[in-house]
Image (spheres, grey):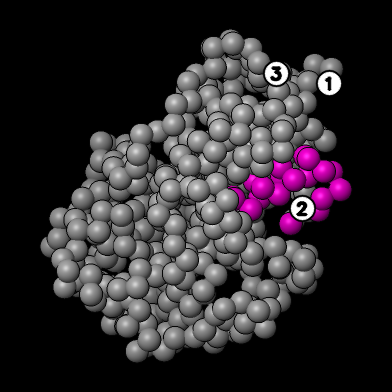
């Protein structure tokens, strides 16, 4: 699980042995087939298997190969929209659901004994811009009014929590936390197997056709999975299996680095309580203490896979800008992964036919949202009267989708300029 030129992620370097998920070598039949062994697919499969439903998960690589196992490991509740807008668009039930998505993660960890370094130390949305403080204050108050354990922090509070001089304020969300994302995926996969589900890695679905009451999912090897229901959970790695689905999201590349272990003196100053942090800029960064004891920082880069450390120059510059103490420290790990972005900044649920359900487009918050959506999808398959957090929408491909990386690169430049000019 490298960035494409041989440097493993800090998660891959500190994870246990991957669960055994051999390629599919025979045609099998199940109640539900799940395409994608990331967080959404594995949580859906786990819920189904624990309920006694026969389920088969297939993935072209293996559990946690994509962004599910490469992300920053920040467990953040909520969506990009604030509670008043969510209430207006979907109602208070949806607002309550997205506000509790982190609960789903930590409940899964506790219930299944997942060893993934999970801790509920909170998340800070920090800002370097005085102009952003009123928005953050309103966001904090909106969640506070709904009973969330949140608070505002001034510049002194930020320095104490983060160890950086660069932030003028922010808000702390006590519902949030952190985990080791690859260990989380491996733990979910083992729990699925222990509950009687099947997972097959190195197994690519090349076509799916309906024959009577069953879907026939044909693999590149010629084997098949036949199932009455199908869950498609491929997110930023969605291909052309289902017509036009790929064109509904933009797979942005998220770049991350982790330094060599910090010294004891540095650890006393930098994120001493191990809270995870994101900054509020339109094209911002996120950071935390990595499992190797180093400082990890990530953010958006180009829309292509990195070819060398030169592609990480913005990330490295941000690292040294916010934390001058680490200037010159060796970079132990550098990696990337695809994040599925949507035009409306909302995750998308699709059910193009009654027996196929799809979820994708978490816009960088897939740990909590993917866990909650995977679980909710499984609940609706077990009991069709169960409500979903968001309504199903039609599969609407983006116009001139193949050119969207170009447009998005221009948009990133534009937003960076706005961030730069804003006070």
Residue at numbered disc 3: 29
Q: Nearer the viewer, residue 50 or 33?
A: 50
Which residue sits at x=52%, y=52%? 109
Q: Is residue 35 above or below residue 314?
A: above
Please give the range of residues in magenta: 370-389
Farthest-out residue, right: 385
Give neighbour class at mark 2: few <14, some 14-19, many 20+ (Cα, 10 Å): some
Q: Is residue 313 above or below residue 150?
A: above
Farthest-out residue, left: 328
Which residue sits at x=42%, y=45%? 183
Magenta-colored segment: predominant secondary structure: helix
Q: Nearer the viewer, residue 376 or 167?
A: 376
Q: Position of residue 74 (x, y in %)?
A: 46, 60
Q: Position of residue 27 (x, y in %)?
A: 64, 12
Which residue sits at x=27%, y=65%? 319
Label whose residue precedes the other's in the sequence (2 or 1): 1
Front tag of 3 and 2:
3
Cβ atoms under marks 3 and 2 closer than 8 Å: no
Residue at numbered disc 1: 213
Which residue sits at x=76%, y=49%? 393
Residue 372 among those drawn in magenta: yes
Say left or right for 222 vs 242.
left
- Give residue 343's mark: none
Label whose residue precedes the other's in the sequence (3 or 2): 3
- Give residue 388's mark: 2
How far apart are the two marked residues, 1 and 3, measured between alpha carbons?
12 Å
Say left or right for 330 vs 24.
left
Give neighbour class at mark 3: few <14, some 14-19, many 20+ (Cα, 10 Å): some
Label 1: element kind: loop
Q: Is residue 156 above or below residue 307?
A: below
């Amino acid at each position: 699980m490298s960035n494409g030129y041989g440097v493993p992620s800090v998660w891959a370097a500190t994870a246990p042995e991957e669960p055994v998920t051999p390629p599919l070598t025979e045609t099998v039949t199940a109640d539900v087939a799940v395409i994608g062994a990331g967080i959404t697919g594995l949580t859906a499969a786990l819920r189904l298997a624990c309920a006694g439903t026969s389920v088969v998960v297939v993935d072209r690589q293996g559990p946690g190969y994509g962004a599910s196992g490469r992300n920053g490991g920040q467990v953040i509740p909520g969506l990009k929209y604030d509670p008043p807008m969510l209430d207006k668009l979907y109602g208070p039930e949806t607002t309550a659901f997205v506000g509790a998505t982190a609960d789903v993660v930590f409940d899964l960890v506790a219930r299944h004994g997942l060893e993934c370094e999970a801790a509920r130390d909170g998340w800070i949305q920090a800002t370097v811009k005085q102009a952003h403080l009123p928005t953050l204050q309103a966001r904090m108050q909106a969640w506070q009014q709904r009973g969330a354990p949140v608070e505002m922090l001034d510049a002194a509070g930020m320095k104490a929590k983060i160890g950086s001089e660069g932030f003028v304020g922010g808000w702390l969300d006590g519902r949030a936390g952190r985990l080791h994302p690859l260990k989380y995926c491996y733990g979910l996969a083992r729990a699925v197997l222990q509950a009687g589900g099947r997972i097959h890695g190195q197994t690519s679905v090349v076509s799916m056709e309906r024959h009577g009451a069953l879907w026939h999912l044909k693999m590149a090897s010629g084997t098949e999975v036949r199932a009455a229901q199908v869950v498609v959970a491929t997110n930023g790695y969605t291909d052309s299996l289902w017509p036009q689905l790929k064109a509904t999201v933009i797979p942005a590349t998220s770049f991350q680095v982790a330094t060599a272990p910090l010294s004891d003196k540095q650890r006393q100053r930098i994120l001493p309580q191990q809270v995870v942090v994101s900054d509020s800029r339109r094209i911002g960064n996120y950071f935390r203490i990595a499992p190797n004891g180093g400082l990890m920082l990530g953010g958006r880069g180009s829309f292509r896979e990195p070819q060398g450390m030169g592609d990480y120059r913005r990330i490295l510059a941000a690292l040294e800008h916010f934390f001058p103490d680490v200037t010159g420290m060796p970079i132990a790990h550098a990696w990337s992964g695809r994040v599925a972005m949507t035009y409306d900044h909302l995750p998308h649920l699709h059910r193009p036919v009654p027996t196929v359900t799809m979820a994708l487009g978490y816009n960088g918050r897939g740990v909590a949202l993917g866990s909650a959506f995977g679980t909710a999808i499984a609940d609706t398959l077990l009991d069709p009267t169960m409500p979903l957090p968001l309504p199903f929408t039609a599969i609407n491909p983006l116009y001139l989708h193949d050119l969207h990386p170009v447009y998005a690169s221009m948009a990133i430049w534009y937003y960076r300029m706005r961030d730069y000019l804003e006070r």
